[in-house]
Image (cartoon, rainbow, N blue to C red):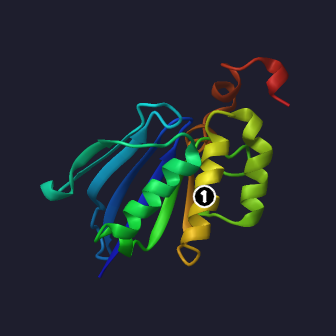
Amino acid sequence: MTTLILTINGGSSSIKFALFEVSREPQSRPQRLLRGGMERIGFSEAHFSVAGNDPEENFSKSIQASDAAGAIDILISWIRNHKKAASINAISHRIVHGGTKYYQPERITAAMLQELRQLSALDPDHLPMEIFLIETLQQHFPKLPQIACFDTAFHHDLPRIAQLLPIPRRYEA
């Protein structure tokens, strides 16, 4: 038996994604089935592309995505119409910043989203888009678990001197 996981990485003007198949067999590694993305969201040259293991799945086309809502609507439509993506078991999101509390992968909750909203000022180019993607996907796929994976995991276990050295002291508090 396998599990299908859709990974999402939302940026300020892009959404990147990949679909992985995970076997429940011990020692097995996830297999990427496809990857894709939308680039230049909010611009006249917005673009949507998918590259998969099956050449028939591959495409690249211009899209009308004047904002994040338009782009996510296109992505949701693609998910629902794609033979494998329509069977996903979970969605994983790359989240740029989890503050001091969030650094390990964990299931997204309403409380987490509220705290992420409060952290949005730390990365206004990415966190608002990531929160929007999570909430929109929750509305369209309410039964699917969504997991947050935080970039701040890298920094969490660094020695204290390495955490403090590159930042102005006023940000320490």
List x then y, in percent, for residue 124: 69, 34
Q: Residue at x 49, y 37 (%)?
A: 41
* Residue sitting nearer the eye, 107 or 56: 56
Disc 1 marks which residue?
134
Residue 132 relative to residue 36: left or right: right
Q: Nearer the viewer, residue 43 or 131?
A: 43
71 in relation to 56, above or below: above
Q: Can residue 57 be seen from the camera position used here?
A: yes
- Which residue is depicted at the point 41% across and 31% down? 45
The answer to whether residue 25 is left or right of residue 55 is right
At a point 13% along the width and 54% down the height, the residue shown is 55
Give the vertical position of 85 relative to 163 (above or below). below
Give percent across and percent down for residue 115.
78, 52
Residue with the most extreme bottom position: 1
Q: Dividing the picture into quarters, in which one does residue 5 lie?
A: bottom left
Mark 1: amino acid: Ile
Looking at the image, residue 140 sits to the left or right of residue 44; the answer is right
Tell me how many marks there are: 1
Residue sticking out furthest to the left: 55
- The answer to whether residue 109 is above or below residue 51 is below
Q: Residue drawn 51% across and 53% down? A: 72
Q: Position of residue 78 (x, y in %)?
A: 38, 61
Query: Circle 1: is it few (<14), some (14-19), or many (20+) Cα within 10 Å?
Result: many
